[in-house]
Image (cartoon, helix red, strand yellow):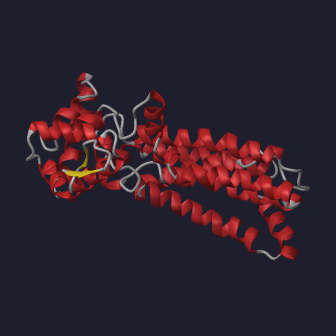
Amino acid sequence: MTRTGGDGMPHWHVSEELAGRYAAGSVTETDAWSVEKHVEACGGCAARISAAVRARPEAGAVLDGVRAGVLAAVAAEGAPARAPARGVRRRFPGVATRAARGRSPGAATRTGRLLWAAGPALRGPWLLALVLVAVGALALAYGAGADDAIRPLLLVVAPVLPLAGVALSYGRHADPMHEITAATPSGGLRLLLTRTAAVLAVSIPTLTLAGAVLPPSAGWPGAAAWLLPGLAMTLAALALGSYVGCRTGATSIAAAWAAAVVLPAFAASPPGAAEAAAAAARYFAGPAAQAGWAAGALVCAALLAVRRRSFDHLETL
């Protein structure tokens, strides 16, 4: 244990050596309990513990086996949701108990717990970037006098912003407790959809409201025209993520949209910006375009339902 602080209080953090012994299950019960209590309030130490567990070659197989057993038991007998904590604790004591009960660092209040459960995207740079895009659009429209250009640019960017939040919401790259969380019955697709819904619940009203108060732009649809494209792309990212992982799936869809729509609209010189914006408008305007996005969303939702079991396997996420 590494002690820090000069205020006379007994501050400490989990050292690399202690994290390694904890992951190996060789610490005493007293030390394990101290570590468990500490990681509830220290994200850095929680990440250190998670990294130590991941470094052990048997970790993935153990957690995969526990999850498979729990899901089978739940389906057959209605086993309680805390079963994985007991199974994982045999190999990785302490952390499993806390994570399976839904506790995480920084969740000291009900609001904190809800925010933590909503996913890493709502606690990180993505939320700030979303607010900056909305505020920046309003500032450019009313402060810089770029009335006609801002609505088209916001409309073409809006559908990919939720994708960034989805990419940051689930998986080893985003959540230091991912392996343990995914080993619980509420992990997998259920947790991914919960966190995706949280991302959409924040991004939809923010971007739609920003678009509604922008000055009207001739020839462009209204502020809500991006909703169906955004929903379809989000579902496409989740469906693709069932094959290649959430981050890769969301990044691939966002990159394709950026190459086809966003970059041409931003890269055009001022004389050609109007033409680029007009070309992008066909993706949003009219019943045919919106019907196409709705059909695409239904197809992706159906594929996601068919592929739902793929999210039960840790190695795919």
- Give the residue drawn at x 24%, y 24%: 79
Q: Residue 5: x, y in percent?
A: 30, 50
Q: Tag count in the figure?
A: 0
| Quarter location, residue 253 | bottom right
Q: Which residue is nearer to you in this view: 269 or 237?
A: 269
Q: Residue furthest right?
A: 218
Question: Does residue 257 appear to the left or right of 61 in the view shown?
Answer: right
Question: Does residue 115 appear to the left or right of 22 in the view shown?
Answer: right
Q: Residue 61: x, y in percent?
A: 19, 51
Q: Relative to 156, is 223 above or below? A: above
Q: Residue 292: x, y in percent?
A: 70, 50
Q: Relative to 255, is 308 above or below? A: above
| Quarter location, residue 309 | top left
| Quarter location, residue 28 | top left
Q: Work out whether residue 203 can be spotted.
A: yes
- Give the residue drawn at x 23%, y 39%: 36
Q: Residue 257: x, y in percent?
A: 64, 63
Q: Work out whether residue 296 can be spotted.
A: no
Question: Does residue 68 appear to the left or right of 277 in the view shown?
Answer: left
Question: Does residue 240 appear to the left or right of 272 in the view shown?
Answer: left
- Give the residue drawn at x 67%, y 45%: 294
Q: Which residue is nearer to you in this view: 8 or 47?
A: 8
